Image: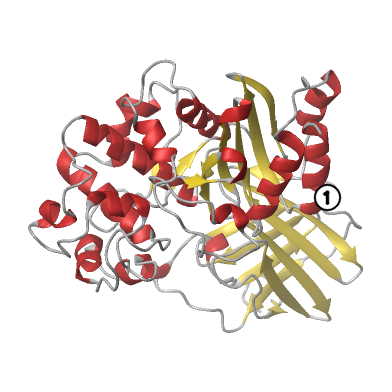
């Protein structure tokens, strides 16, 4: 098998990879991005952020600021279950029986909310995926160092690895969210994986990489049989994999896969619900591949692209207004790709669709067979039938792609939106809009 066979299979079965970097023997042997995604645009990592939080804990332990075997309560004025240790946060064996994140993020003080939750099992005895535990581990580091995670890691990790683009979301109290919220470029993720594979420069504390990535706890009953690589054990915010590999990962296919026996690292960003499918292709096509990429492969990697929409060009124009648009409170506003459509009006002109929603007014070029990029948004569109226009918007700093299908009937248009991936529904109720009458300039 080969890189080409991996690309063939991925483009045939996965919707869709956005970028990849493959490192062998410390050298990049393959790097490619599916247009409109680009090498220079940081991608949201979601739970791959956890592996960076683990690294911050490792530095804090080496500097004598945090003790893995100290009770968590010692760092919070005695609050919390005295049986819960710092290492239980890292191994997600806090004794909770479900992820604590949904319960703690509803208020302002997430740490206090976490410490008040009941602990149903003996800490250390039971694995459950627990993003709230990662938040608390990050909070301990930030309380002990007086710095945000992103600032604490900058001289210790990000600068030595030449990271240029890191950002991290913050909680209401100003702490980095730790379990999610980081952004980085695909090539930077690959350098992070290479550090955990082989730390030639001694950047990490001695012994930390081995401890963080070994099987600290078993989790054979977690997940389901369709996600077998999520049942191979867990380290300190790293997953074990089949084939004696390990990885950090985040929702919708943000992966840093380290294969020690092959001296290889694969970093991937994508937008898919089926992360196991990516790993299956890695094991099938890349695990035992030793052949150097051919020149034709390099050329292919340089010209990767997601399919643009094809169809006819239209001369339709006019503004259509939604009579009772969905209202969103200002405190609930999120980027348009993370909430149901809030369309107030839609305007069609040749080669352009303009949407007004709760976040503002967005003009999207809509020409068949082309992607057009504006900042971190890219659009493609076409008239797929004489009475239907389809617009697709990719938010290229993350996995989300939204598709709008606009069906015309006289002076009305019905807009049906759907998402490629989502933490909630991927399809939404149709929105109906009516053509806005033209005026003569005097309001008539």
In the image, taking residue 355 as reference, residue 67 lies left or right, namely left
Q: Quadrant of residue 93?
A: bottom left
Query: Is residue 170 in view from this perspective?
Result: no
Examine the rendered structure and indicate whether residue 440 appears above or below residue 249: below
Name the one closer to the observer, 316 or 77.
77
Identify the residue at image location x=35%, y=37%: 55
In the image, taking residue 389 as reference, residue 325 lies left or right, namely left
**Which secondary structure lies at badge 1?**
helix
Name the one closer to the observer, 391 or 241.
241
Query: Is residue 185 in view from this perspective?
Result: yes
Residue where numbered disc 1 is placed: 12
Picture coordinates of residue 262 (x, y %)?
63, 27
Q: Quadrant of residue 440?
A: bottom right
Marker count (numbered): 1
In the image, taking residue 48 as reference, residue 385 lies left or right, namely right
Image color mode? secondary structure
Examine the rendered structure and indicate whether residue 138 appears above or below residue 205: below
Examine the rendered structure and indicate whether residue 294 appears above or below residue 300: above
Picture coordinates of residue 109 (x, y %)?
21, 63
For label 1, the crowd category at 10 Å Cα-Cα, with few meaning under 14, some 14 to 19 and many 20 or more, is few
Q: Residue furthest left?
A: 77
Identify the residue at image location x=39%, y=70%: 98
Q: Quadrant of residue 108?
A: bottom left
Picture quarter with the N terminus:
top right
Picture coordinates of residue 169 (x, y %)?
37, 50
Picture coordinates of residue 250 (x, y %)?
52, 50
Identify the residue at image location x=29%, y=74%: 120
Examine the rendered structure and indicate whether residue 228 appears above or below residue 195: below
Q: Residue furthest top?
A: 201
Picture quarter with the C terminus:
bottom right
């Amino acid at each position: 098998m080969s890189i080409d066979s991996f690309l063939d299979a991925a483009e045939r079965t996965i919707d869709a990879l956005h970028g990849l970097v493959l490192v062998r023997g410390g050298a990049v042997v393959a790097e490619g991005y599916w247009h409109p995604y680009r090498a220079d645009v940081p991608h949201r990592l979601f739970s791959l952020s956890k592996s960076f939080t683990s690294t911050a804990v490792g530095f804090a332990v080496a500097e004598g600021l945090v003790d893995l075997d100290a009770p968590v309560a010692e760092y919070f004025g005695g609050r919390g279950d005295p049986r819960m240790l710092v290492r239980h946060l890292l191994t997600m064996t806090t004794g909770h029986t479900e992820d604590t994140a949904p319960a703690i993020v509803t208020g302002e003080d997430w740490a206090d909310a976490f410490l008040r939750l009941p602990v149903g099992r003996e800490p250390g005895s039971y694995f459950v995926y627990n993003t709230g535990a990662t938040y608390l581990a990050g909070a301990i580091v930030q309380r002990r160092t007086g710095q945000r995670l992103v600032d604490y890691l900058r001289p210790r990790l990000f600068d030595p690895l030449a990271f240029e683009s890191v950002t991290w979301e913050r909680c209401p109290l100003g702490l980095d969210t730790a379990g999610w919220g980081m952004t980085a470029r695909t090539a930077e993720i690959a350098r992070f994986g290479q550090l955990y594979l082989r730390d030639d420069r001694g950047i990490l504390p001695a012994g930390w990489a081995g401890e963080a990535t070994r099987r600290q706890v078993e989790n054979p009953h977690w997940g389901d049989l369709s996600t077998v690589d999520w049942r191979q054990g867990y380290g300190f915010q790293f997953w074990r994999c089949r084939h004696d590999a390990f990885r950090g990962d985040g929702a919708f296919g943000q992966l840093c896969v380290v294969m020690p026996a092959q001296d290889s690292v694969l970093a991937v960003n994508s937008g898919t619900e089926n992360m196991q499918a990516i790993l299956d292709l890695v094991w099938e096509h890349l695990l035992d591949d030793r052949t150097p990429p051919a020149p034709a492969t390099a050329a292919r990697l340089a010209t990767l692209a997601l399919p643009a929409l094809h169809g006819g060009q239209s001369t339709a124009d006019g503004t259509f207004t939604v009579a009772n648009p969905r209202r969103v409170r200002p405190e609930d506003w999120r980027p348009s790709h993370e909430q149901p459509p809030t369309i107030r009006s839609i305007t069609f002109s040749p080669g352009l669709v303009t949407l007004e929603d709760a976040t503002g007014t967005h003009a999207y070029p809509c020409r068949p067979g082309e992607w057009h990029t504006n900042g971190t948004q890219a659009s493609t569109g076409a008239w797929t039938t004489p009475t239907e226009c389809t617009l697709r918007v990719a938010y290229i700093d993350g996995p989300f792609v939204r598709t709008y299908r606009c069906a015309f009937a006289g002076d009305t248009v019905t807009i049906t939106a759907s998402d490629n991936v989502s933490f909630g529904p991927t399809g939404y109720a149709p929105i109906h809009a009516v053509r806005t009458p033209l005026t003569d300039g005097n309001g008539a």
